Amino acid sequence: MIDWWQAILVLLAGGLISGVTAYATHHWTTSAGRDAEERQAKRRLEEEQRQAIRQLRRERIQPVLDFLDIAKRSAARQTIEEALDEVYEKMSGDVRPALDRWQEMKERVFEAYPDVVEVTRTVSVAMWSGVSVPGLLHKLIRIYSAVHPATHRERQRQLADAIRSVEELVEQYLAGAEPHESTSDEPSQET
């Protein structure tokens, strides 16, 4: 049989063991919860930082995108203008309007077309905005030189390739990848 003092000792030992176990369990669960909260807060902060960087990159590269839009509109205008001129040449003399009237009609069609000053302004802003993206300046200059009407026919294919390569560089830049210069874009090919 157990004496009363032994029973008290067993009771105290059991209480001490259960108290230590409860404390350890509470400590481990709260510690794990705090660690999980800290990891989650760190991930949230990292994602917010990535979003802020993406937004900053989008704002910074927007002038390049604006120039690309104007270059595409200019190339489209030149293609349409050439088609209209071909139509004019094929018209018979009795239905063909006077050349100045025809030019007026064409200008009305293209009233929204940005003039040369606007193209030059947007390429300048785009070049300054993209100065830190490797290879971008050279490609923007290729686009700008191909946009001029005098060189349109012979540069149309180069313009499409240059626009495509600039768009790829912009996508890489916005994704955060380090863009690289292609070896096929040598300046000697441009002249």
Image (cartoon, rainbow, N blue to C red):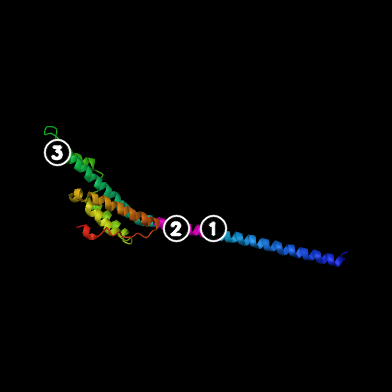
In the image, residue 77 lies at what x, y percent?
23, 45
Q: Which residues are magenta?
A: 40-56
Q: Is residue 133 magenta?
A: no
Name which residue lies at 22% across and 44% down.
79
- Quick one: label 2 or label 3, which is nearer the N terminus? 2
- Amino acid marked by disc 1: Gln
Q: Could you tell me which secondary element the residue under label 3 belongs to?
A: helix
Quarter of the image for the C terminus: give it. Answer: bottom left
Q: Give SS at disc 2.
A: helix
| Residue pointed to by mark 3 | 89
Q: Residue at x 70, y 61 (%)?
A: 22
Earlier-in-chain disc, 3 versus 1: 1
Label 3 crowd bin: few (<14), some (14–19), many (20+), radius 10 Å = few
Residue ID for mark 1 = 40
Residue type highlighted by circle 3: Glu
- Does the CB distance between marks 2 and 1 fall below 8 Å? no
Q: Residues within 10 Å of mark 1 (few under 14, many from 20)?
A: few
Q: Does 14 sit left or right of 151 as displayed?
A: right
Q: Is residue 170 left or right of residue 88?
A: right
Q: Give the mark, 2 or 1, whose residue is nearer the N terminus.
A: 1
Q: Amino acid at mark 2?
A: Arg
Q: Position of residue 20 (x, y in %)?
A: 71, 64
Residue 146 % position (x, y): 22, 52
Which quadrant is the N terminus positioned in?
bottom right
Residue at mark 3 to residue at mark 1: CA–CA distance:
70 Å
Q: CA distance from mark 2 to mark 1?
A: 15 Å
Q: Which residue is mark 2?
A: 50
Q: Determine whether 145 is above or below 77 in the image.
A: below
Image point (25%, 51%), residue name: 159
Asked where in the image residue 35 lies, by quadrant, the reply is bottom right
